[in-house]
Image: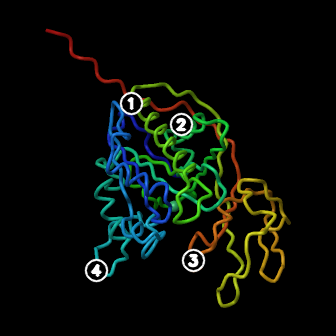
Amino acid sequence: MCSRPEPREPLRRVAVVGGTHGNEMSGVYLARHWLRAPGELRRPSFSAVPVLANPAATAACRRYVDCDLNRTFTSAFLTARAHPDDPYEVTRARELNQLLGPKASGQAFDFVLDLHNTTASMGTCLIAESAHNVFAMHLCRHLQLQSPELPCRVFLYQLPGEESYSVSSVAKNGLGLELGPQPQGVLRADLLIRMRALVAAALDFIQLFNQGTAFPAFEMEAYRKVSSVNFPRTEAGELAGMVHPQLQDRDFEPLRPGAPVFQTFSGKDVLYEGEATATPCSSMRPPTTRRALPSSRRRSSRSLCLPCPAGPRPAPAPAPAPAP
Ligand SMILES: [Zn+2]
């Protein structure tokens, strides 16, 4: 299970990243705006740096150019010898590793907040590596309390033993925000406003941490992936069905064994074959043309009730030496 060391010093080097996927427009437009006017990202104890992560994919309004940037921050990609034929995103990951990392080093940024949209009806989803990251869990809790009337779920993406691969994994600590539903390449005002408020609240939380604020223990519901299910395909690999109409827009609602998941274009229902009730999410994303993409699958997750210990605090500054 992944566990990052909890911060013991104030967080000074913070980045807010948009455009990791070039067609998720809330983060793209916010990052572009903050690159022109970064004052909104300043707090008394630090100034967050805005970053447009994938400029080429953003210019083309595509998720990526050659491969998914948010899967390329592994040691294999980051440490391999550079080659002219490397995919654009692999080269860009190395550049971002120089800017925000190097990954797993003492020089890495203290925190990266990575902004995403989804076409799925997931509302606000906070994407953390693991519940063992106590700082990120307290940040999630803080964000949930900002607008308690709005669903704001916590999704733990990293599987036990799996190497971290996202842009935020380059920093010492990080969190992803994923807001939806929003079509790819489209900007919805409500989601941009919500994302902007969440970023402001996250920076406020870091400011509170830097001030030495105490964060008491709590319990939190979180979701963890249990499986991925591919959309139905023909033998030639073409899409053969869609999310079942009874499941459409029902992310995070319980899915019981035997309930319909997909409907093929010939009208046949494909049923959920799991043995226990699960929670589908990211399920309404239209499948893309490449079979191997995660976006051609629906995720099945399960909720957990997690205890979270009291939050870390910066070590107190050493007392000044007594005057001679
Ligand atoms: Zn994304």
Q: State the residue position of label 2.
A: 138
Task: Say if residue 139 shows up in the picture.
Answer: yes
Return the residue at label 1: 210
Q: 10 Å neighbourhood of mark 2: few (<14), some, or many (≥20)?
A: many
Does label 3 or label 4 sit earlier along the sequence?
4
Which mark sits nearer the N-terminus, 3 or 1? 1
- The residue at the far bottom in this view is 236
Q: What residue type is labelled 3?
A: Ala
Q: Which amino acid does label 1 sit on?
A: Asn
Q: Are marks 2 and 3 in contact (CB under 8 Å)?
A: no
Q: Residues within 10 Å of mark 3 (few under 14, many from 20)?
A: few
Question: Toward the viewer: 47 or 223?
Answer: 47
Q: Residue at x 20, y 11 (%)?
A: 322
Left or right of 27? Residue 281 is right
Q: Which of marks 1 and 4 is nearer the N terminus?
A: 4
Image spot of residue 84 (x, y percent): 28, 80
Residue 170, given in percent of the width and then of the height, sits at 38, 55
Residues at marks 3 and 4, CA–CA distance in whole angstroms: 25 Å
Q: Name the residue under label 3.
A: 292
Q: Earlier in the sequence, mark 2 or mark 3?
A: 2
Residue furthest out toward the top: 324
